[in-house]
Amino acid sequence: MKNPLVGGILVSALCLGVLLNRQSLAESYQTQSTAQPDQVGLQPPSAVPPLTGHSLSIDRSKDNPVNLEQLGQPPAVEELAHHFMATAYSLRGRTASGRRAGHGVIAADHRVLPLGTRVRLEAGPYTGEYVVADTGSAVRGREIDIWVPSESEAVRFGRRRVKLIVLQRPAKRAPRVKMSR
């Protein structure tokens, strides 16, 4: 339709037809009284109140109560459990976050687990809480590196599948603004 006036007239006519059809249905419903009350205890249609405009309202507050305390709750910790491939490393020095490499430190892909994320690992004797404080050059996707004190322990660790549960994500910081001189 290229003319909006014609479209408006058609919509108006359609709405008028719907309203007239609704009214005629209500009138025919009221005039039908052929059904007899049966043994179950139904009332004849004449006893049913007539339909009037838009007076129908449904009170669902009693049907499905909502616990307001649950609406703002974060998902349970177990819902954040994922499986990662883990390796171990034993380098010394500072991590990408500036923290010293040591017990409780893991390296992860910053796009999957940002620096500062607290996690719980289930990895046999290495089970415990860790902080993502490093990014490895070869750590991509769902891979992590667990810091261990010696190279021989890292070799013994090998490569294994671990369960990782996110305990706390870091707070979002305001973006850095470059100051002009």
Image (cartoon, helix red, strand yellow):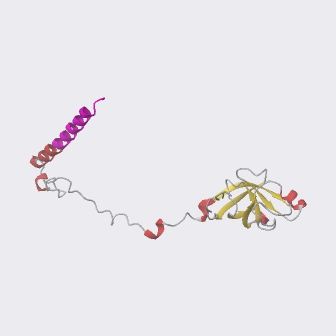
| Residue extent of the magenta highlight | 1-21
**Image x and y of residue 104, in percent:** 77, 67
Quadrant location of residue 28? top left
Looking at the image, the residue that sits furthest to the bottom is 69
**Above-or-below relation of 2 to 28:** above
In magenta stretch: residue 14: yes
**Image x and y of residue 71, in percent:** 47, 65
**Image x and y of residue 79, in percent:** 59, 60
Q: Nearer the viewer, residue 148 or 78?
A: 148
Q: Main secondary structure of the magenta part?
A: helix
Which of the image's four quarters has the N terminus? top left
Looking at the image, the residue that sits furthest to the right is 152
Quadrant location of residue 20? top left
Instruction: Using residue 1 as the reference point, say whether residue 124 is left or right of it.
Output: right
Q: Nearer the viewer, residue 134 or 103?
A: 134
Which of the image's four quarters has the C terminus? bottom right
Q: Nearer the viewer, residue 95 or 39?
A: 95
Q: Nearer the viewer, residue 93 or 39?
A: 93
**Image x and y of residue 148, in percent:** 83, 63
Looking at the image, the residue that sits furthest to the front is 181
In magenta stretch: residue 11: yes
Residue drawn at the location 83% of the way across and 58% of the way down: 89
Instruction: Using residue 61 as the reference point, say whether residue 103 is left or right of it.
Output: right
Residue drawn at the location 12% of the way across and 56% of the way down: 47
How many marks the image carries: the answer is 0
